[in-house]
Image: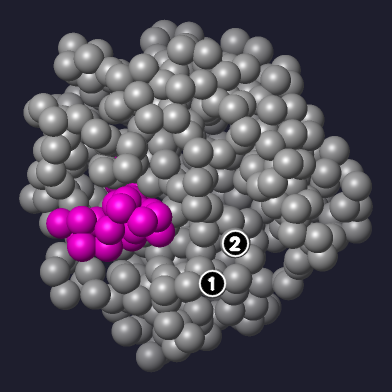
Amino acid sequence: MTDDLLARPLALPAGPALPNRFAKSAMSERMGDRDFGPTDALVTLYRRWAAGGAGLLITGNVMIDRAHRAETGNVVLEGGRHADAFAAWARSTEGTPARLWMQINHPGRQTPRFLDPASVAPSAVPLAIGGGTSATPRALTHDEILDVIARFATTASLAQEAGFDGVQIHGAHGYLVSQFLSPRSNLRDDDWGGDDERRRRFLLEVVRAMRAAVGPGYPIGVKLNSADFQRGGFTEEASMAVIEALEGEGIDLIEVSGGTYEKAVMFEETMPQGASSEAREAYFSDYAAKLRERVIVPVMVTGGFRTRAGMEAALADGATDLVGLARPLAFEPDLPQRLLDGATDAATPVKPATGFKTLDGMVQGGWYGAQLKRLGRGDESSPKLSRLRAVWECLTTGPRKPRGPLGRLCLSRRSSSPG
């Protein structure tokens, strides 16, 4: 293992190389304006991250249809609206080597009824969280599925036109693509469901439509669950089979995550059981190491990385090609550069929790959300941000993990807030 592993460029199949092995994974900034366009705060936030040393920045989820959004404050890219604002967002990395990719998403059933009382999904299976805050979805027709696929491709083309360096399909965490992949939420027995091969058809058709829209030299990535950690759900073996199929489609990068909002291991502060061994710092790197035996597509692992030693070990043994960081960059936006410069060996430990499990999901999500808003205003992050302020942030404008009665209150309040 050498000292420059984190600084090495990474060549992607589409051609463009990433300047180093740090990647800022998507977080839900929720900084769209009232017409769902990017705001100046988003540009300021991404300028800060671009200057912070990460070679790849992936935006929070950008929706493909203003009628179907996951949260208040979501940005939507579906036509010619806000072209100048999207171009300004794409230019936020100017003067730095960082590459900016747009994460593209459709929530499917995973949206509160306050935003989408007529949600759609592969099947009419309600979301099993939120105490009724989400409506039972309507099953998409075949023609509607084709329309959604076309919308993904249109948004990718518009992102390319605006100047983004690549796109990522959000296929994890229980959103629409993830819903098609899971036998718990996809009960169809037609061209789009009934077995693993048909359940993954939707994602593959999205990739094909995107590639046709953006051409062969434009990077396309996919964020995918290693598993959804639910009985009868999307399994590790099914996930690896999906990635093998994606490699056959010429995908450029797979980001490995896990869980859904019904089983939200991606937000846990401790390693989810079975997600990784004690020998590795990152949550899903055991899965990624097994995946490496089956595919050669570049892999990004997000979740759990905190130390230089853990990051370098994962790179050295091939468990990952990119170190994905999310919440640490909400508090320390320059952490990658400080690690590259040798100014630090680890992320600053922060645990914005109350000690009460019912409240902790609200506190942690709200605390990090409040830090993003500080950075978007041009301020510094603050370790002194109070827990009460974090709860208020969750109840009004902050992201997210609903948990228990107060978590459901957080979900309903944040979803009815103005964007």
Tell me if residue 213 comes above or below residue 390 in the rendering.
above
The image shows residue 232 at horizontal and vertical percentages of 30, 53
Q: Start and end of the magenta stretch?
A: 219-241
| Residue at the (47%, 34%) spot, across then down | 127
Tell me if residue 201 comes above or below residue 303 in the rendering.
above
Q: Is residue 372 left or right of residue 393?
A: left
Q: Secondary structure at mark 1?
A: loop
Q: CA distance from mark 2 to mark 1?
A: 7 Å
| Residue at the (18%, 12%) spot, across then down | 143
| Residue identified by numbered label 1 | 271
The image shows residue 226 at horizontal and vertical percentages of 33, 60
In magenta stretch: residue 70: no
Tell me if residue 103 comes above or below residue 22 in the rendering.
above
Quadrant for residue 402, please give it: top right
Q: Is residue 263 left or right of residue 164?
A: right
Type of amino acid under label 1: Met
Q: In which quadrant of the rendered image does the N terminus lie?
A: bottom left
Q: Are marks 2 and 1 in contact (CB under 8 Å)?
A: yes
| Residue identified by numbered label 2 | 268
In magenta stretch: residue 238: yes
Type of amino acid under label 2: Glu
| Residue at the (52%, 59%) spot, across then down | 265
Return the residue nearer the eye: 391 or 55: 391
